[in-house]
Image (tube, rainbow, N blue to C red):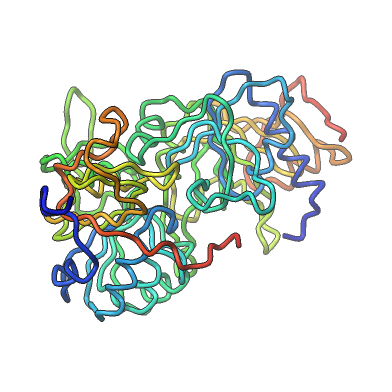
């Protein structure tokens, strides 16, 4: 099965892609839909000075929050860090730069990067200094917009429920969130999945991320953190 | 905090009266999350979550939680018949395209012009705006449900917001423990008071000029 496209592999084989100073985009929303095994392996490898791009910084012990809490990120581009007090502390101490982007605009910036666009025009946060600072404006049909640049990353990591050997992905319920967008925006995209199924067994109508965007598929060891509600 | 559950529920109940059959509704955390408890069961409402759910239902029974089915606050939910999941871009497409009928949010300050500040306390708390800017700017109706006073006892309804704005001129209605206010083109109007508060007390305790509607409703729960 694995020889078909060369995408099916394991954690060990993908770890050389992670290095100090790299840009790393991650799927997930409050840790839901973030890839637990890849996050642990990145921590174990002691990868530092990361530029992280994703919806939020999780919780201190959940999702990407585990990496952030250890001070391994030099910069984060996110919409929210409120559920991870360590992220706020690192930001206030000047140890981690945070670029805030409104949540849906961040999603579109990632999507734009993923579909080969340079930027989008958006009218969210125009009169908000923190959102609009430094961004060029553009007038189209008598309406003013901010130019929001597209985002890509050296590596994208996503978490899916099912994959086939071509890397076609299906996500589980609200764990989909930013994953299909992040999957498109990595120069290299690695999908950690709960189940690998034979080629031809996924209904083509139900595939959420076409395998075209996915370079490697690895099996997940499963979520090993305790959720905030538990 | 410092406020009984009955008062929080009174505010949530009043907010629920703004929801009509067939609406798509987005609720913020805190008091807004109590709103579904007060909706009449015959109403067909689709609750929207920024993380990609349309049609959220009740909280699951203890032990029935699904870690991959959570709301935007990260807490487990269920779905109702007719629900759907989508990615974050589509979830916000619904917001920016004006498909959300009502959003009910908390706030730190609201001005008499409907300016909303609910995302940052400079030098103290910088959580990020999340999806609040898009919701405030693009939902058809923006209702703020909040305590009338901050922890220093100052009115959170103000003539001009001193905290950084989430979005200017976006709030349509404010519900506090004292009453209900509507933001109009001619200024803030008190439309309802919660008894035993009096009209005079409520206007005096509000930090900006307030007009009082002639047909003011006095609510007793």
Give percent across and percent down for residue B118: 51, 51
**Count of all numbered marks drawn on residues in the image:** 0
Looking at the rendered image, the quarter that the N terminus of chain B falls into is: bottom right
Quadrant for residue A198, please give it: top left
Query: Farthest residue in the front direction?
Result: A1
Residue at point 59%, 30% (across, down): B80
Q: Residue at x 77, y 25 (%)?
A: B216
- Left-right relation of B98 to A196: right
- Expressed as whole percent of the image width and height from the top left, the position of residue B134 reads 40, 39
Depicted A207 relative to depicted B151: above or below: above
User: Considering depth in this image, is A107 or B198 the residue closer to the camera?
Assistant: A107
Q: Residue at x 52, y 46 (%)?
A: B71
Which picture quadrant has residue B127?
bottom left
Residue B70, relative to residue B140: is it above or below? below
Please say whether residue A20 is visible from this viewpoint: yes
Q: Is residue A140 left or right of residue A44?
A: left
Q: Is residue B185 visible?
A: no
Q: Which corner quadrant of the image does residue B189 belong to?
A: top right
Residue B163, percent across and down? 48, 56
Residue B100 x, y percent position in the rendering? 48, 28
Please indicate whether residue B95 sits to the left or right of residue A10 in the image: right
For the point 40% across and 68% down, the residue is: A65
Taking depth in this image into account, of A126 and A172 the one nearest to the observer is A172
Q: Quadrant of the C terminus of chain B?
A: top right
């Amino acid at each position: 099965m694995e020889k078909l496209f060369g995408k099916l592999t394991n954690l060990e084989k993908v770890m050389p892609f992670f290095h100090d100073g790299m840009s790393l985009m991650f799927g997930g929303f409050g840790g839901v839909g973030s890839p637990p095994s890849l996050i642990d392996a990145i921590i174990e490898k002691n990868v530092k000075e990361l530029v992280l791009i994703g919806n939020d910084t999780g919780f201190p012990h959940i999702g990407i929050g585990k990496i952030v809490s250890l001070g391994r990120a030099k910069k984060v581009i996110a919409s929210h860090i409120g559920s991870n007090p360590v992220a706020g502390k690192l930001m206030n101490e000047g140890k981690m730069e945070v670029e805030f982007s409104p949540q849906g605009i961040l999603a579109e910036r990632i999507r734009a990067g993923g579909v080969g666009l340079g930027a989008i025009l958006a009218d969210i946060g125009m009169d908000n200094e923190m959102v609009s600072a430094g961004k060029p404006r553009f007038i189209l049909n008598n309406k003013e917009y901010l130019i929001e640049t597209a985002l890509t990353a050296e590596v994208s990591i996503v978490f899916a429920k099912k994959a086939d050997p071509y890397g076609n992905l299906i996500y589980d319920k609200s764990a989909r969130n930013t994953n299909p967008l992040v999957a498109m925006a990595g120069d290299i995209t690695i999908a950690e999945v709960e189940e690998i199924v034979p080629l031809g067994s996924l209904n083509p109508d139900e595939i959420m991320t076409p395998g075209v965007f996915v370079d490697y598929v690895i099996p997940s060891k499963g979520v090993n953190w305790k959720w905030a509600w538990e | 905090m410092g406020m009984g559950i009955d008062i929080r529920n009174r505010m949530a109940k009043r907010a629920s009266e703004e929801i009509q059959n067939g609406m798509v509704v987005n609720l913020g955390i805190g008091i807004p999350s109590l709103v579904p408890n007060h909706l009449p069961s015959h109403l067909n409402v689709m609750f929207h979550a920024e993380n990609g759910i349309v049609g959220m239902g009740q909280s699951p029974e203890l032990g029935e939680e699904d870690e991959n089915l959570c709301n935007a606050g990260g807490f487990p939910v269920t779905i109702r018949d007719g629900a759907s999941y989508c990615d974050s871009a589509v979830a916000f497409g619904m917001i920016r395209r004006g498909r959300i009928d009502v959003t009910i949010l908390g706030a730190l300050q609201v001005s008499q012009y409907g300016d909303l500040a609910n995302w940052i306390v400079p030098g103290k708390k910088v959580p990020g705006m999340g999806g609040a800017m898009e919701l405030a700017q693009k939902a058809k109706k923006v209702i703020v449900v909040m305590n009338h006073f901050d922890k220093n006892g100052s009115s959170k309804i103000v003539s001009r917001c001193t905290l950084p704005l989430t979005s200017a001129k976006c709030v349509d209605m404010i519900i506090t423990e004292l009453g209900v206010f509507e933001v109009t083109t001619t200024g803030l109007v008190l439309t309802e008071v919660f008894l035993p508060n009096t009209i005079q007390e409520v206007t005096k305790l509000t930090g900006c000029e307030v007009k009082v509607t002639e047909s003011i409703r006095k609510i007793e729960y």
